[in-house]
Image (cartoon, coloured by chain):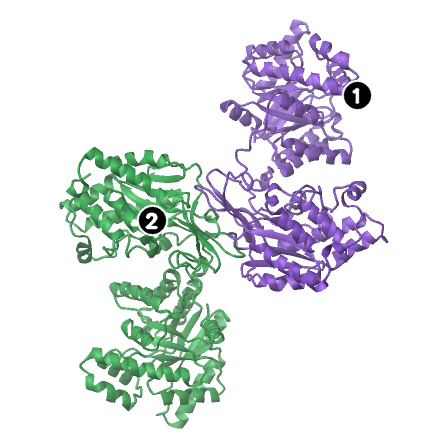
Chain colours: A green, B purple
Amino acid sequence: MKISQKIEQAAKEDRVWWSFEYFPPRTAQGLQNLLDRIERMRALGPEFVDITWNAGGRTSELTSELVKTCQKLIGIETCMHLTCTGMPKEKVDIALREAKQHGCRNVLALRGDPPVGKEWEAVEGGFHYGIDLVRYIRKQYDDYFDIAVAGYPQTHLLPPEEAALEMQYLKDKVDAGANFIFTQMFYDIDMFVDWVRAVRAAGITIPIVPGIMPIQTWNGFQKATSLAKITVPQAFLDELEPHKNNDEKVRELGTKLVANMCRQVLAADLGIKGLHFYTMNLEKGCRMLLEELNLVPRVEVVKPLPWRQSLTPNRRAETIRPIFWANRTRSYLSRTENWDEYPNGRFGDSRSPAYGELDGYGIWLKQSKDDALKLWNTPTTVDEITALFAKFCLGQLQALPWSDSAPSSETTVIAQQLAKLNSLGFLTINSQPAVDGARSDDRIHGWGPANGYVYQKAYLEFFVSPELLDMLIPHIERDINITYYVINNRGDLRTNTHSDGPNAVTWGVFPGKEIVQPTIVEAISFMAWKDEAYELGRQWAKLYDPDSPTRKLIDGIMDSYYLVNVVHNDFKKPEAIFEPFFKAGAEYAAKHDAPKTNGHAH
Amino acid sequence: MKISQKIEQAAKEDRVWWSFEYFPPRTAQGLQNLLDRIERMRALGPEFVDITWNAGGRTSELTSELVKTCQKLIGIETCMHLTCTGMPKEKVDIALREAKQHGCRNVLALRGDPPVGKEWEAVEGGFHYGIDLVRYIRKQYDDYFDIAVAGYPQTHLLPPEEAALEMQYLKDKVDAGANFIFTQMFYDIDMFVDWVRAVRAAGITIPIVPGIMPIQTWNGFQKATSLAKITVPQAFLDELEPHKNNDEKVRELGTKLVANMCRQVLAADLGIKGLHFYTMNLEKGCRMLLEELNLVPRVEVVKPLPWRQSLTPNRRAETIRPIFWANRTRSYLSRTENWDEYPNGRFGDSRSPAYGELDGYGIWLKQSKDDALKLWNTPTTVDEITALFAKFCLGQLQALPWSDSAPSSETTVIAQQLAKLNSLGFLTINSQPAVDGARSDDRIHGWGPANGYVYQKAYLEFFVSPELLDMLIPHIERDINITYYVINNRGDLRTNTHSDGPNAVTWGVFPGKEIVQPTIVEAISFMAWKDEAYELGRQWAKLYDPDSPTRKLIDGIMDSYYLVNVVHNDFKKPEAIFEPFFKAGAEYAAKHDAPKTNGHAH
């Protein structure tokens, strides 16, 4: 979606909005951290995010990659910077083409800074000024992109004729097709207000979005303002300098100062309702500033589906996914990246049910070896493993190799049952409770438009030993409402379903709409998923020395255990799915005649 | 579906089955009557129907048409006769091609009788014997068709060498690829049993289906048996002849005689579980015979959808239809005949939402003018009209121009409310009650596989005067759960829905399956339907003289009234849909300050 549309919408609703700018990090670990942060900061409610283009385009591929991830995985609208520095036309073409492929509709066209220590110089076959880029984008892509340009409020120290020239440049860029203006950072509210009035006086009517730099540390503040020659009001210095060795205090006071400035911007009758935060890839400063300003994220008016949709063009219409990757969205997106079309309405609509191979993407644990050992220790018995799984279900363990984050709030309603299942030897890696027509605005289970009802069939997926499975199956088959798939690591599949078709396990009924069924269970997808499920166990084992008991234990489980998924099709009986498990577990315990806490391996 | 598969299935379930044979009638009225009869007799539970091919192929197009209607509209598996008589190869090709197009999988290949009063003679470029036809069909269509051939039990009077030759002919036809045998009619059980044993002794192992001719009148019985030189046991004659002037009595006694024979056939350890009834296009004889034999139709194990699916190949996968044609299936099938594909899973899947024009099919009332006058009299006030509609809702009137048959059993749960609505001036022509998760085997609302749940949103469709509509709309709009479409005969559409998409008003949730949503409400379909809805009113008006008050009254309604459909989207509140109507109706009555029974026009 174009930012100008968002600005217009917010104006119509008379609502203050904000956005976050990030820059591409230098390392792979930095990239992972940034993605986690963008994901977390999504909860702060930014209207969009903005990814800078590094001078000289050194990390330009990273910019493109970040834009893609934001659009596709994080599902947040993105603006991409594009500079003239070190960019021959071909590179600009690639950048724009990829942005469009990723569904990005917004580009900030800049001349860009010169490489450090050098004068600015156009590359051969490249562009000289921001306006060249604006014209080129407009020519090549018509009005597909919203084009933003930079505005520099810091002109009041310039000689009048130079300031007039700057204004003329801005006017020219707007006339060339720019849709809105991001301003450089500033701290002098009077200067900013004067500048905005001057811009308007010059006949420029497109929206102006003020760039706000939170004050995080004394040194950072000093460096940023001196580098960009930003006027800092004396009052700021008077307040902050006494605490220049106390970052905590600087941030606290700086937050109040900047918040005060923001309030003045919003109150100044300039028609400005948006604030663009230069996050410097940091979370705290932004968070404090938003809190100080009392800006809380809108309750998402519509969470259209129980899972977050991609914003890339080819996936925008996607409305169904298998449940198996519920905790591994990124992997699902990757393994289905080359599908011609994505399931919409019915899973059977997907014409290309071929999942990408595992090695095309690679499976790894997110945790470093150290983190993993801290989390999971060195279990040497099956009971120690089951204890880890049970703790995870109860929210006492942050992650498992199959889940990077704590169980979703909706599974907490069955946390006790899940913990019991695990302690009985069923190692659950995915689940959902039955829901029989919760309202679509239900705090825990709700999704979709207002005045609807949402439903779920109870679902369990777990690893289980052959012996325990043999005890479980007869109990499962006694309940005609249960359908199951059993598979081993070699891919031998067993099921009691009679049809190959998908089983809808989450669906919603809404006013004036067809039934929406965003989550399904299905054989082919399960077979593709099992490679990943077993591989995650293998990766876990590999954290330990080849001859260690833990390595052998986990490898042994991955060698011999079955992966099973079970759906209880009667969603009006939420507890019924657990009964066969409790019975089989009791039988198993009776047979082995030993309390489960003895730590014997089963 | 092939009949051999049905025979196999019934054998597996150790279940007696039966089928009905019909012949193409000579007149258009006869055709309509026959179709009505086949539809009615479907309720007697035939496994399939069988349509004869007239000698000389004179009515061959009618045979093809009948096969099509049975497959497509009546949704019953069909066997088509095909004869050599008067059929050049090209005609055979056309017949087979069309049979396949209509989804018919069964052909009875016969030489056929000679034209009356002539010797049998092959046409130029035609076939000589049934076996030629068997070979040709097998060659042209591989095993697409089940091929049946005729068997003649009436051979015990033939010289032994001739009987042996007949048996050899049969064996040759079987070797040429026949799948099963229909026998000629017979009444001599011993002869039949002997013949079956001889057939088996000759090494013929395919199923034998005995042809059973009910005895309906003495003359008919005499004519049929003498024409085909059928042996009639003396006991039959002894019983029947004394009553030969009393058809009633002949039928009664004949039924017992034939039923007794059927019991012997089924009990004779011949492996025969099926009875093929030569209905002679009559209902009573078959019905009495089945009753006498205590053969009741199976409760349909699976009624896959709330409406009856077509068996033609291109429509077999169709799973969604608009609710508007619920009482006019034939018209819907016709107006969508040229669609490239049919909605399956989602209505949006239909790529060709263009409805055929009305004149492509023609709209007429099924009732003759006399019937219509008897049914509907000559109303001269709006209140007399509303009274007709109210009576229809209460089951006290058999048909309305918009519905050929009484309201379905499921609407009887809202019959009182509907009658009240009509008496208030809302002329309902379609409706369904809300259903919140009835079991799929529910006697009234159930459909689909076992152990599922079915749902409906309450639906009303009606004609209404502009004044009453103006009173209704504010009440409707006060309930956020109601969506509506209003249209007039010029096609001006008003709605409070925000999306163009379809609204699923009937859906089901079943074990191991995606959600099934067989009925929807949608704008484009409604606009196509309204032409038909108004035209039916026009047709009604045309039954009366141009200057008659009734003609003017009905034409006036069709000129000025709106057609409205209303969905109450909260299916958990079954009564809520009626409230706005009762309120608006009360307002209207108060304003006009007159009891509705006064018969004033509104």
Q: In this view, does A555 lie above or below B565?
A: above
Label 1 in the same subunit as label 2: no
Q: In this view, does A5 lie to the left or right of B368?
A: left
Q: What residue type is labelled 1?
A: Val
Disc 1: which residue: B116
Which mark is on residue B598?
A: none
Depth order, front residue of A489/A58: A489
For image coordinates 20% across by 45% down, the residue present is: A554
Residue A118 in view in this figure: no
Q: Which secondary structure lies at badge 2? A: strand
Quarter of the image that includes the N terminus of chain B: top right
Question: Residue A51 is drawn in which quadrant?
Answer: bottom left
> Mark 2 — on which chain does it sit?
A
Q: Is residue B204 left or right of residue A256?
A: right
Disc 2: which residue: A431
Q: In this view, does B213 lie to the left or right of A383?
A: right
